[in-house]
Amino acid sequence: MSKIAVVYWSGTGNTQAMAEAVRDGAKGAGADVDLITASDFGASKVPMYDAIAFGCPAMGAENLEEGEFEPMFDALVKSLAGKRIALFGSYGWGDGEWMRNWETRCEEAGATLVHDSVICQEAPDADALAACGTLGASLTK
């Protein structure tokens, strides 16, 4: 059985809803899943998991949230080399540049993106939540 972490930050509940769908998809595929807020995760926990999904909305000028998520992620990104990961998040404006930049950062650190990242504008609709479930299931393979 795969051990999966779903690590997220959410200000409005949109990314939390996506995180819960990722969790449900991974559980449905037979994984043991921990849903963890960014403030409760760090580099020391990375080795405990077979795969990790990270979720964060776009903030400001299409950046990761800077108070909790970015400091946490910056501190652990180097520990993702060889790790199977997936990314998801919501945005209110722009064209998803924050996600493309985030994917590049993960690839440059040596992480393996196991699924296309899932993004949605504002609150996730049924299609976005289904895509999150599929993303979660892909972490178990």
Image: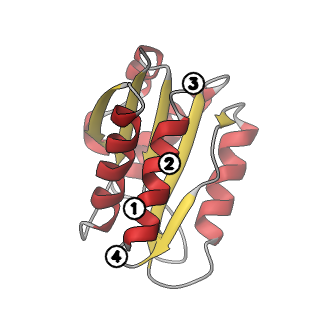
Q: How many marks do you count on the picture? A: 4
Q: Please give the residue where the numbered disc 2 appears in the rendered image.
A: 134
Q: Please give the residue where the numbered disc 4 appears in the rendered image.
A: 123
| Kind of residue indicated by mark 3 | Ser
What whole-number distance in Å separates the C-alpha atoms at marks 1 and 3?
28 Å
Q: Is residue 138 above or below residue 100?
A: above
Question: Which residue is rendered at x = 66% and y = 25% of the image?
Answer: 81
What whole-number distance in Å separates the C-alpha atoms at marks 3 and 2?
25 Å
Q: Is residue 94 above or below residue 113?
A: below
Q: Residues within 10 Å of mark 3 (few under 14, many from 20)?
A: some
Q: Nearer the viewer, mark 3 or mark 2?
A: 2
Find numbered disc 1 in the image and state the secondary structure of the residue it sits on: helix
Q: Answer yes or no: is residue 117 visible.
A: yes
| Kind of residue indicated by mark 2 | Thr
The mark nearer the N terminus, 3 or 4, is 3
| Kind of residue indicated by mark 4 | Ala
Quarter occupied by the N terminus: top left
Question: Which residue is rendered at x = 29% and y = 50% of the image?
Answer: 20
Look at the numbered discs 2 and 4 and tell me whether their residues touch, using CB distance below 8 Å: no
Q: Please give the residue where the numbered disc 3 appears in the rendered image.
A: 79
What whole-number distance in Å separates the C-alpha atoms at marks 3 and 4?
31 Å
Q: Which mark is residue 129?
A: 1
Q: Residues within 10 Å of mark 1 (few under 14, many from 20)?
A: many
Q: Nearer the viewer, mark 4 or mark 1?
A: 1
The mark nearer the N terminus, 1 or 3, is 3
What whole-number distance in Å separates the C-alpha atoms at marks 2 and 4?
18 Å
Find numbered disc 3 in the image and state the secondary structure of the residue it sits on: helix
